[in-house]
Image: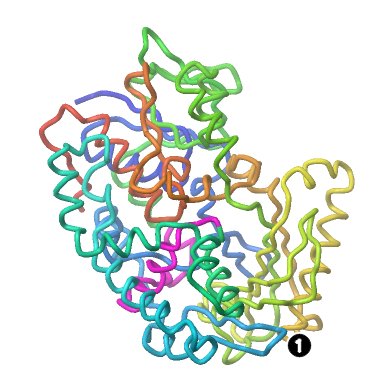
Amino acid sequence: MDQHIVIVGGGLAGLSAGCYARANGFRATILEHNLALGGVCTAWQRGDYVVDGCIHWLTGGPFMRLYEELGIVPQVELRTIEHMLTWRDAKSGAEVRVTRDLDALARALETIAPGDATEIARIVEGARRFASTTPPGLERPMELTTLRQQVQMFWDMKDSLTTFVHFRKSIATWTREHVRDQTLRRFLSGLVPSEAPALFLLMVFGYLERGYLSRPVGGTARFRDALIAEYERLGGEARTHATVDEILVDDGKASGVRLADGSMIAADAVVSTSSAPETVLRLLGGRFDAADTRHRMEHWKMFQPIVLASFGVDASPAGVPGMLLVDHVEPYEVGGVTSDHLYLRVCNDDASLAPAGHSVIQAMLATDYAWWAKQGSSYNAAKERVAEIALAQIEKVLPGTRDRVRMTDIVTPLTYWSMARSWRGAYEGWMPNADSLFGRVKKTLSGLERFVMAGQWVEPGGGVPTAIMSGRQAIQLLRANEETFAVPVR
């Protein structure tokens, strides 16, 4: 086979698609808008410190096979997370440690909310059931799943269907209907976005208990670079600083792309990992399934844009968990959005991110894309103000930090757009909801052959494993009529 696949975007989905394309005999060319591969799965050097911009935890378990197929594991060591995070209520002083001991978590929650003991027990049972199921689409995309296979899939999940139905609602709706205690509501709603199905909460708890959640030793950069190395080992080609302006279509078939410099690259098939709005409405000119995309843009929520404020400090806070969620803090405003909670990441358990005795402390702050887009010449001054706001909040939680700051780095929604073309700063695409579960975003477009979409915009909820899985599925869809599908062999 000497067919050429052009892949728009060199993030995890694009690199994954490239690896599986090469394993299946295709020539593959990745075209990446940025100066480097990786997309939002990235990290960068700032003086003596590394700003880790992506993997807070890596979901393994059934997804581990993907990392093994792509040669990431065992090349990258994965350290199992024992203590995932600590949640703290600044108003009441309540504190909850989320560790692999799910029974201990249940006891802690019952202490806070004894009247919710029944629902807490249901959470624990549901988490264990969820962790025992295989995510749909891992073996093959839903588009290639026969009716018989779908029936078998639901039959295999029959013991968990009651759990799935109960927790299918959004966190906000489920807690309102089933959780009485306000503090418990705040805790549960703070762990995952309130619009997401409560099933995501079960996944976190269940996977954590089983040891399925980990952090790559060497951080995001080590994970990303291992995937890039595998793509290069397989003979894939990549062009950086190559912005695609149009996907070319000939007689209802994708036939290549036109770049911003006017040059054109012919292809036998095209895989786009760009955002759905960018791909459907701009690169394809709204000619295929545009109504579906516009409907989602009007009715579905995207991930809340953030400011990522990172500080290199000449201290390594002892006894502080890798993630700290503080609720009921004094309200503060960042770029048009007011918050009363604080999400901190303390990178003090990986020697590759800071010199000995130092660490990087990060704050993820909700913000508004349009606010930043209107700053114009005041943009840099706005970043400086946000840095001060973030540092003031961190100082309240980790006193003494301010005087030990040696590096400051501020990422805004515009950074995500310029770096990875994340539509309106939505770094993980569509927020998951009940309508988007089980692969309800098609990876193909009606009336367009030899074209597939991959990445976080066709996997609502985003994340590392689903982005990689979608790249695998893209090549499966292009080989839909083939009898075999090959995975990379080392």
Mark 1 surroundings: few (<14), some (14-19) or many (≥20) residues within 10 A: few
Which residue is identified by label 1? 399
Judged left or right of residue 58, residue 303 is right
Judged left or right of residue 228, residue 390 is right
**Where are the magenta residues, as a range?**
195-223
Look at the image and say whether residue 19 sits in the magenta stretch. no
Q: Residue at x 58, y 81 (%)?
A: 87
Residue 409 screen position, x and y as percent? 72, 63
Coloring scheme used: rainbow
Judged left or right of residue 129, residue 281 is right
Where 422 sits versus 383, above or below? above
Judged left or right of residue 199, residue 385 is right
Residue 277 screen position, x and y as percent? 55, 31
Where 177 sits versus 10, above or below? below
Where 432 sits versus 116, above or below? above
The foreground one among 98 and 321 is: 98
Regarding residue 225, the answer to whether it shows in the image is no
Where 42 sits versus 486, above or below? below
